[in-house]
Image (tube, coloured by chain):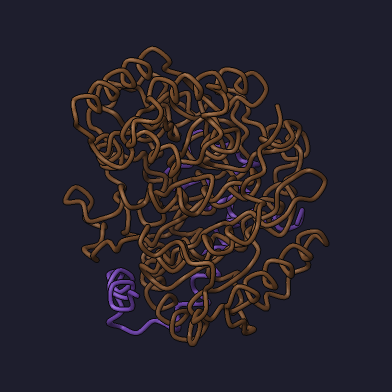
Amino acid sequence: MAAEKGAASPATSLMHGAGAAGIAPERLADIAIEVERLSGVVQAQAPQLSFNDEPGLFAATLDNTAR
Amino acid sequence: MSKDLALLDLAEASERLAAGAISSIALTEACLDRAKAWQASRNCFIRIDADAAMEAARERDGELKAGRRRGPLHGVPLAHKDMFYRHGKVSTGGSKILQDQVATTTATVLRRLDAAGAIEIGVLNMSEFAAGPTGHNIHFGHCRNAFNAAHIPGGSSSGSAVAVAARTVFGALGSDTGASIRLPAAYNGVTGLKPTYGRVSRHGAMPRSWSMDHVGPFGRSARDCALLLQVIAGHDQNDATSSGQAVPDYLGALGAERISGLTIGVADHGVALDPDIAAAMDESVRVLERIGARIVRVALPDLAPLFRVGETIIKGEAAALHRQWLASRPQDYSNSVRFRIEGGLFLSAADYIDALRLRGVMTAKFIAETMDGIDLLHLPTSPVLPPTLADSDMERADSETLLGLFSRLTMFMRPFNFLGLPAISVPCRFANGLPIAFQLAGHPFAEATLLHAADAYQRATEYHRVVPEL
């Protein structure tokens, strides 16, 4: 974990990103790990998506399968 | 005498009021007496509005004498998480930032409760900005577990659960973005329902994450939750995400001793539970089987992706909501809440949108596969007993360790926020004096089935009737 934080490449890129102002550099290292983890999960699941899947499918699914 | 009145359940209080057997003034006095007595040690209220409550009670009694009954909650004292806006009043959201903000609208759920005749005796404590599963709050003081003040009440709707458990109100509303109704309900021995996404309007409820926020009731029983849900459910033209699905007769679904015909899938989750919780789960399944349910085992998919993709949505939306204050007033957030939100500033738009797209696909798959052939899914509400406040204070302890604990506390609940499916937490045992609960999740808009099963379970057991001692 310490090595991940120290590697700094994701954190370094975050420091130049919008919203980084006011966030301590050491905190940015933690955030970089967190963002990578979430992004990794989303991207690992993304192959389930087809081109035409849109966010509105969620509400339609609930309505269409209502009991 | 007046204190005994506060021990009635909501359904009994409503019936006796309607029959003229008791007055709203007497009920409200009884609740206020208990609220004041419990507040010192549990801090479940942010504000107690005794004068306004008594004035409303006098008005309701006068109306009844004149032959006017507004609705099923006429004259019944309630209180709600301090995040439901009421025009002209402050809703703090448990935060320093909103502590002076006067609402310019009234939440749809409050309008509906008003129309049904309910009274509010105050507003209830909560985690800051509805973020945090413990009930710690550095701005208004920590809320404490109704059964043991050294332990957390669970959050974020901490005050709602404690106020109902302590019998200071007959019911309460809360919100649930990732466990925030069900966890405090479980940890305080009350019944808490997270309805289907879209079943209850979010208009006028302080947002944490528009896509994942669910508004729902706390009650002393499933029957009390049904009464409250009946009043607040239904389409609202002010909330575009509210559903047009017809609202069934929830109370009409209750009253049976048996649940024959229902198939309950018991989740094979593969998670090591606290031994007391494991025993409680086994016992609750035996009771459900004894009262007529067909029990089958169900293999759960890996819950982690449901949890994490949902977390991506929450963090992205919360960051957008708070971006300006994070930049201009970072010192006015607790560390724990700021840490929870600020990561969302760095998520990519494509990841956030893919998370929203995945929600429909993963929900359809869960319904088609995991819920196939069953009416309800049974699993623990939380796999661990409530920790102490001292052991779970993120302002003091190592945040990474505690974030791991928090993920564990909520691991069986958060997936149902992402999936949008209804879920109810039902008290089922005690260990070391602290409550344990199981959770039932259902098909979309099947709240009546959830309430039917929970009500039948409560007709066969007494756990929900245990009143904590001050």
In purple, which chain?
A
Residue B376: % across, % down: 51, 74
Picture residue at 30% right of the left edge, 47% below the top:
B231
Quarter of the view holding residue B251: bottom left
Q: Nearer the viewer, residue B130 or B165?
A: B165
Whether residue B48 sits left or right of residue B393 in the image: it is left
Image side of residue B94 versus residue A12, left or right: left
- Where does the image place residue B394, in percent across and percent down from the top left? 68, 37
Q: In the image, is residue B137 above or below residue B9?
A: above
Res B327 visible: no
**Residue B381 located left or right of residue B341:** right
Q: Nearer the viewer, residue B314 or A2?
A: B314
Query: Could you tell whether B237 is left or right of B45 in the image?
Result: left
The residue lying at 42 percent from left, 26 percent from top is B92
Residue at 67% across, 51% down = B463
The residue sitting at 43% across, 62% down in the picture is B254
Position of B68 relative to B96 (above/below) = below
**Residue B206 at x, y = what percent?**
36, 39
Judged from this view, the residue extending furthest toward the left is: B237
Seen from the viewer's position, the closer of residues B430 and B420 is: B430
Chain seen in brown:
B
Nearer to us in this view, B363 or B21? B21
> In the image, is residue B442 above or below residue B186?
below
